[in-house]
Amino acid sequence: GSSLADRPWVFLLRASDEAMSKPSGLVALAAVAVLLFWNGGKALADGFGDVETGHGQIRVVFSLTTIPTRIAKIQRVLKAIVDEQTYPLDAVYLAVPPTVTDLPKWLEEFNATSRRPGILKVLRMAADYGPSSKLLAALAEGGESGSSTTLIVYGDDDVMYGTDIVEQHVQAQLAASAAGRRVAFGSRKIAIGGGQRREELLEATGTISVFASVVPQTVFQISSLPAACRLSDDYWISHNLLSAGVELDTLPRCVYDFHRGVWPESLCGASFHALRSVQHIDALSETVIGADGEVERRSGGDWREQLSRYSRCQDILLSKDEL
């Protein structure tokens, strides 16, 4: 498909869905229009990877991580992110843990065969942050930490993402930024707990976007916590974002349909679905945590076990007076 640079008015009209839904909608929409056509159309001339905003140029990256048992099987996932997005990414980070010693040949040659050579960056981590590496490695090993001009979109290695999902994140974040909001956007949002313990969280399986500068350094404390938290990246990251005053919101258009169990094609673009050949390999959603708070087995669990793990992590943080 064509990029946003080829169709700025489509971008502006779609961004209006988010802007007009807020009290300051007209102001936000006008601001977005100014951002897009600032400096004599510089954003359009240079490409939307260099969109001028009130705080500088936006750099948009996608980040994900993988594990030894999956890395050989994620070529299609990476291709959908690097080659097939309507929004041209500045970089795609693949965080690889130290337990991966050799890369698959196709991965070593990916940039040579890609339609966008050089965009994929393999990040070799000296220490593994666990599943939170999908965000943390982009900040640390990728060097994006603290950048107010870097928008990080992150997701999982077992999902084929729709072709315009990055475009939707950029639209939503531009409109939110113009309205003065600090937001993490996603397509799947759930909640755990009740009463004063109720907490919302975004699930990375549907992609999440956040500016690097609003991610607090406390997220890196995950390395010292029990498995109940280390393996609860969605809860842990959302908890820290909320604690730092960042809103959690769903994208204006693409929202997962929990009743049907799908990302609607009409809202999320074509080919947005879990990759069955990968999703059940050492899946976090199927991992069972024992009474000691550590991994009991990597299979046999389900979404109930995952929610239980989130609640157990919440208990740990409460006991540490960090909630």
Image: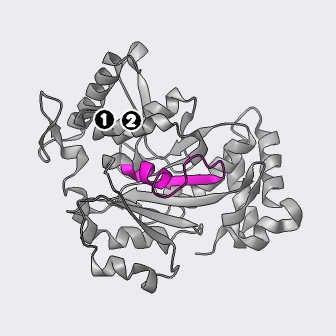
The residue stretch that appears in magenta: 133-153
Q: Name the image quarter holding the C terminus.
A: top left
Q: CB atoms at circles 1 and 2 under 8 Å apart?
A: yes
Q: Residue at x 43, y 37 (%)?
A: 219
Q: Residue at x 40, y 58 (%)?
A: 64
How crowded pointer 1 is (Cα within 10 Å; few <14, some 14-19, many 20+) is rated as few
Membership of 266 in magenta stretch: no
What's the mark number on residue 221? 2
**Distance Cα–Cα, label 1 vs label 2:** 6 Å
What's the mark number on residue 282? none
Amino acid type of the residue tagged 2 in the rendering? Gln
78 shown above or below 66: below
What is the quadrant of residue 230 in the picture? top left
Rendered location of residue 25, percent (x, y): 76, 39
How crowded pointer 2 is (Cα within 10 Å; few <14, some 14-19, many 20+) is rated as few
Membership of 139 in magenta stretch: yes
Secondary structure beneath dot 2 equals helix
Q: 191 and 315: which one is in front?
A: 315
In the image as oriented, which residue stretches furthest toward the front? 126
Q: Seen in the image, is 238 located left or right of residue 49?
A: left
Q: 14 and 214: which one is in front?
A: 214
Rendered location of residue 118, percent (x, y): 51, 77
Rendered location of residue 300, percent (x, y): 11, 44
Rendered location of residue 7, percent (x, y): 72, 69
What is the quadrant of residue 24 in the picture? top right
Q: For mark 1, what is the residue?
A: 224
Q: Residue at x 47, y 51 (%)?
A: 140
158 shown above or below 46: above
